[in-house]
Image (cartoon, rainbow, N blue to C red):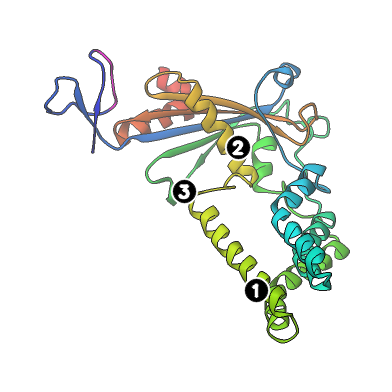
């Protein structure tokens, strides 16, 4: 239970309790009702200042290759230093991860795209409600609403890789090379590598291990996935725009291109309740609005 100081006259879903201050309330764990609405983005939505989250489903864009280069810039710098100082071909070892990642990105598997408003009846379909039952929800309630063609695509075909034998073989080879790279480098460092370069190789890998742990436990680069970027965009709006004491709302655009035919508008509304029954009643109100009004 959390004791919070709130101004006099304000309301909270928590239960009033005794405290040293007359403005102290005891807030119990709240129950969240999350309502995610998906619709086809209109021209007005696309020209609005709503944040846009994009995703590549074909060959990665230039930004992906620049991000790969930026993530391997330390290895590139060490390779240049080793080559300038020792004129040794062992400098290529530090360029191998960059080369493998570039090849993997070039031969990335193409995936199924979003449903287009032209090739489907998504715009004309009436919206449906889809209640989500998830053990990880910890007693919270989740509801998806929208035309079935737009909502169900995320549970069916969207993001599924398209079969391509050449690209699949290249990806498997990249995985094998990445897995064998460190043991091969370790063997080379113990048998053939000069002692000076061996010390540099050992220091570099110690740096990589330390940087990896710091990045992991400091949550650096945690928004590298599409779902993380979507959650980050929602969280930023929720923090900036507070609809009421118990309601948070946010909206984003999601697609391959902002002006594309597949672009979706996603609206999030989260309400917080002090009891599980209140959350259940809110869920019933969303599922049966006509019945709740009656």
What secondary structure prevails in the magenta region? loop
Query: What is the residue that sits farthest to the bottom in this orientation?
Result: 191
Circle 1 residue: 199
Q: Is residue 291 above or below residue 159?
A: above
For the C terminus, the quadrant is top left
Instruction: Please report whichever mark, 1 or 2, sits nearer to the chain's N-terminal start.
Output: 1
Residue 134: assigned label = 3
Numbered disc in front, either 1 or 2:
1
Q: Which residues are magenta?
A: 9-13
Q: Earlier in the sequence, mark 2 or mark 3?
A: 3
Residue at mark 3 to residue at mark 1: CA–CA distance: 51 Å
Q: Which residue, as the protein is rendered here, is positioned at the far right? A: 166
Residue 247 image-quadrant placement: top left
Q: Nearer the viewer, mark 2 or mark 3?
A: 2
In this picture, residue 276 sits left or right of residue 191: left
Foreground mark, 3 or 1, reads 1
């Amino acid at each position: 239970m959390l004791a919070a100081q709130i101004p006099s006259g304000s309301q909270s879903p928590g239960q009033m309790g005794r405290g040293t201050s007359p403005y102290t309330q005891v807030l119990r764990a709240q129950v969240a009702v999350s309502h995610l609405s998906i619709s086809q983005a209109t021209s007005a939505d696309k020209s609005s200042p709503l944040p846009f989250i994009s995703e590549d489903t074909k060959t990665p864009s230039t930004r992906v290759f620049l991000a790969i280069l930026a993530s391997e810039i330390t290895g590139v710098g060490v390779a240049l230093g080793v080559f300038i100082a020792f004129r040794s071909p062992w400098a290529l070892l530090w360029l191998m991860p960059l080369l493998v990642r570039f090849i993997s990105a070039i031969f990335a598997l193409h995936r199924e795209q979003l449903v287009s408003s032209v090739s489907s009846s998504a715009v004309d379909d009436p919206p449906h409600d889809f209640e989500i039952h998830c053990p990880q929800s910890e007693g919270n309630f989740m509801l998806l609403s929208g035309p079935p063609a737009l909502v169900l695509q995320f549970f069916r075909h969207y993001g599924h890789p398209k079969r391509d034998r050449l690209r699949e073989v290249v990806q498997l080879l990249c995985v094998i090379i990445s897995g064998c790279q460190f043991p091969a480098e370790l063997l080379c460092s113990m048998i053939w590598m000069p002692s000076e370069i061996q010390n540099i190789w050992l220091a570099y890998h110690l740096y990589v291990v330390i940087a990896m742990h710091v990045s992991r436990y400091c949550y650096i680069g945690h928004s590298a996935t599409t779902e993380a970027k979507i959650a980050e965009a929602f969280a930023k709006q929720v923090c900036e725009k507070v609809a009421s004491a118990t309601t948070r709302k946010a909206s984003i655009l999601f697609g391959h291109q902002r002006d594309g035919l597949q672009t979706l508008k996603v609206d999030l509304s989260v309400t917080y309740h002090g009891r599980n029954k209140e959350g259940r009643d809110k869920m019933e109100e969303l599922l049966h609005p006509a019945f709740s009004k009656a």
